[in-house]
Amino acid sequence: MRRRPMLLGGAALALPALARAQSGNQADWPQRPVRMVIPYPPGGASDIIARLLAPQLTESLGQTLVVENRPGANGFIAAELVARSAPDGYTLLMGNAGPNGMGPALYGSRTPFDAMHDFAPVMAVSIVPQIMAVHPSVPVRDMPGFLAYARAQDGRMSYGSAGVGSAGHMAMELLKSLTDIQLTHVPYRGSAPSTADLIAGVIPVNFDTVPVLLPHVRAGRVRGIAVSSLQRVPEAPELAAIAETVPGFETVSWGGVLAPAGTPAPIIARLNAALQLAMARPEVGGALARQGIQPQSGSPAAFGAYLAAEITKWTGVVQRMGLTPD
């Protein structure tokens, strides 16, 4: 059964919440288009989710929801832009596990914003398991075979990720720490370029989300080895969970909408209600599920608690493993 740890409410609660939110001092919001900033190039899970949400939010809010990709600096450019924006509800972030959880845990005081205090949580929208995939030239087909092959390479093997502090980076570093394999990290500026180089054979192995890699697995362009979630995923039941071979291994990416800290509560409430309505629609929640993205819903407080727990968790992992961003 799929876990939905952030699910606290559904569409049944959204309509009255939307009405209540509109009755506040910010009832005239929005009066112009709303921008949702994505911390990676087009093609990744965050981009997929935002573009599915955009027409639904445009309809609910009565103003255009504009999706803007601002990749770079491991997602920190987009996150800092939103953190420094006016708290008026017109600039939002499609946050995720990289720049809003794992990255701050890895970079610590070098993070150009305060991941806990510079944002107002709106709603969690997704949990996304990852696939570990290899180029077809790599002579392995399962996790035991991969570990044996990596050990035989004796440190000569590399792996790619969407960037330093990304979910893929942290997943492989966790695997390395649990198995004593040695691979060199090659960070990219997002999922699209790292996936392209995996397909081309420039890098032999990569971790990325199910919606990013599964189509290429199905097409034979890359070979799926295992998934990062504790259980197998329904979209690819033939892929074992890494935990079946490596006890204690589990990582997932997540996505959620964040606003700048200080955004008025009525605006947060209206956004949350609109997001709940959108996620309940089959053209959003159903479409995400078909791509291997587990739709989420719930309150701003629930998302804030989850975000705090993720930062605490990964800060501990980084300290135990002695990881640095350099």
Image (cartoon, grey):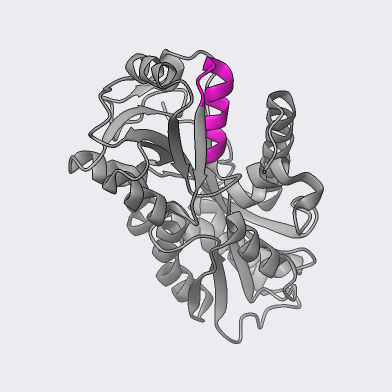
**Magenta-colored stretch includes residue 173:** yes
User: What's the residue at 57%, 62% (across, down)?
Assistant: 72
User: What's the residue at 61%, 65% (across, down)?
Assistant: 78
Give the magenta part as a residue range: 169-182
The x, y position of residue 88, in whole percent, is: 72, 76
Can you say which quadrant of the picture contains the N terminus? top left
Q: Is residue 6 above or below residue 48?
A: above
Quarter-wise, where is residue 113 in the image? bottom right
Quarter-wise, where is residue 281 in the image? bottom left
Q: Is residue 102 above or below residue 91?
A: above
**Magenta-colored stretch includes residue 32:** no
User: What's the residue at 33%, 54% (across, down)?
Assistant: 282
The x, y position of residue 301, in whole percent, is: 71, 48
The x, y position of residue 216, in whole percent, is: 25, 45
Can you say which quadrant of the picture contains the C terminus? top right
Main SS type for the magenta part?
helix
Q: Name the foreground residue: 206 vs 37.
A: 206
Name of the residue lying farthest toward the bottom: 31
